[in-house]
Image: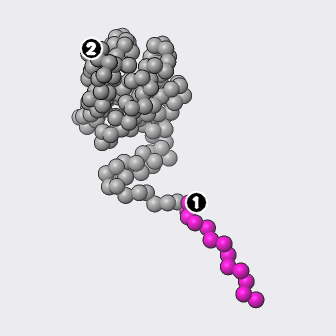
Amino acid sequence: MRVHLGCDHAGLELKSHLTGWLVDHGYEPVDHGPFVYDAVDDYPVFCLRAAEGVVADRAAGLDSLGVVIGGSGNGEQIAANKVKGIRAALAWSEETAALAREHNDAWVVAVGGRMHTLDELTRLVEVFLGTPFPGDERHVRRIGQMASYESTGELPPLPASAQAVTAPAPDDA
């Protein structure tokens, strides 16, 4: 599996560590930068490219996921989600890393380099990459609703449970 990586200065150390870890575990890392420390670099420059790499690979039929890293992971997740077709999830626990794949078929995981130890962050990425999307009907349906909205801008119809309930009219006796 190919894994696209992008980060900012706060994720540079982790990205360097992950590149080696990925190779050691049979993955093919694709590093979109940065490659040197710059305290004022801009994460969108790198995270957008990582997310675009995942989309391009998948369009070509390749098995590919992405990892974006920052101080908190929040901005990096937001940037990755701007790429059409990407579902990026912020992981802060093993459970959220697994659920991102199991329930959302997320293709990119965002992690916060200042929020966890190096070992914890590596484990979050390991869980994310190792968790398959089982394709349960309810999750496929929900992903389809988001994809449809992304391409058409039309909101999905409200279910019956969300329809306004009107009180019965009082008897006119």
- 28 sits left or right of 71 in the view: left
Q: Is residue 54 visible?
A: no
Q: Estimate how packed mark 2 is, as few (under 14), some (14 to 19) or many (20 or more) residues with alpha carbons within 10 Å.
A: few
Tell me the element at label 1: helix
Amino acid identity at mark 1: Ser
Q: Which residue is mark 1?
A: 161
Taking the spot 40% from the left edge, 48% from the top edge, the residue there is 146
Tell me the element at label 2: loop
Q: Residue furthest right?
A: 173
Look at the image and tell me in which quarter the N terminus lies: top left
Taking the spot 50% from the left edge, 26% from the top edge, the residue there is 92
Query: In the rendered structure, does residue 19 fall within the stretch colored magenta?
Result: no
Nearest to the observer: residue 22 or residue 154 = 154
Residue 36: which numbered mark, if any? 2
Taking the spot 66% from the left edge, 72% from the top edge, the residue there is 167
Above or below 50: residue 135: below
Which residues lie in the magenta part?
160-173
The first of marks 2 and 1 along the sequence is 2
x and y percentages locating residue 172 in the rendered image: 72, 87
x and y percentages locating residue 89 in the rendered image: 43, 33
